[in-house]
Amino acid sequence: MARVDGRLYAFDDLCPNDEVPLSSGLLTGTTIMCQCDGSRFDITTGAVLNGPATTPLTTYQASGTDGAIVAAL
C-alpha cells in the first residue's frame, strides 16, 4: 500500500516479472520501480510503464476511515 497526495493505493507487493518485493523498490509519485529488474508500474492502474515486465501489477481499491485502512481483495 502507498499514500500519495492523500490518496491510498493498494497493490500486490511482488513484481509480476520476477516476484521480488516491490516494498523494497522506489516509489516516485504514483510510479513504483522494481529494485531488481527496473520494471516500472503505475500504482493507480497497474499498467506497465517500462519493462522488462509485460504483466500488469494487480491493484485493489483502498480506503481509509477512522484510522483504519481497508483494501478490497
Image (cartoon, rainbow, N blue to C red):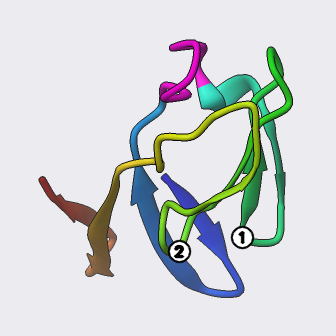
* Type of amino acid at the residue the image marks with label 1: Thr
The 10 Å Cα crowd at callout 1, few under 14, some 14 to 19, many 20 or more, is some
Q: Main secondary structure of the magenta part?
A: loop
Q: Is residue 19 above or below residue 2?
A: above
Residue behind mark 1: 30
Gap between marks 2 and 1 measured at Cα: 7 Å
- Residue 16 part of the magenta-drawn span: yes
Residue under the image location 41 percent in, 50 percent down: 11
- Residue 8 part of the magenta-drawn span: no
Query: Picture quarter containing residue 33?
Result: top right
The 10 Å Cα crowd at callout 2, few under 14, some 14 to 19, many 20 or more, is some
Residue under the image location 48 percent in, 72 percent down: 45
Of marks 2 and 1, which one's residue comes earlier in the chain? 1
Q: Which residues are magenta?
A: 14-21
Residue 44's disc is 2
Q: Position of residue 62 (x, y in %)?
A: 30, 71
Q: Nearer the viewer, residue 32 or 3?
A: 32
Residue under the image location 49 percent in, 25 percent down: 14
Q: Nearer the viewer, residue 47 or 64?
A: 47
Residue under the image location 48 percent in, 52 percent down: 1
Check disc 2 and report its element: helix, strand or loop: loop
Q: Position of residue 49 (x, y in %)?
A: 74, 59
* Type of amino acid at the residue the image marks with label 2: Thr
Count of numbered badges drawn on the protein? 2
Say if mark 2 contacts mark 1, CB within 8 Å: yes
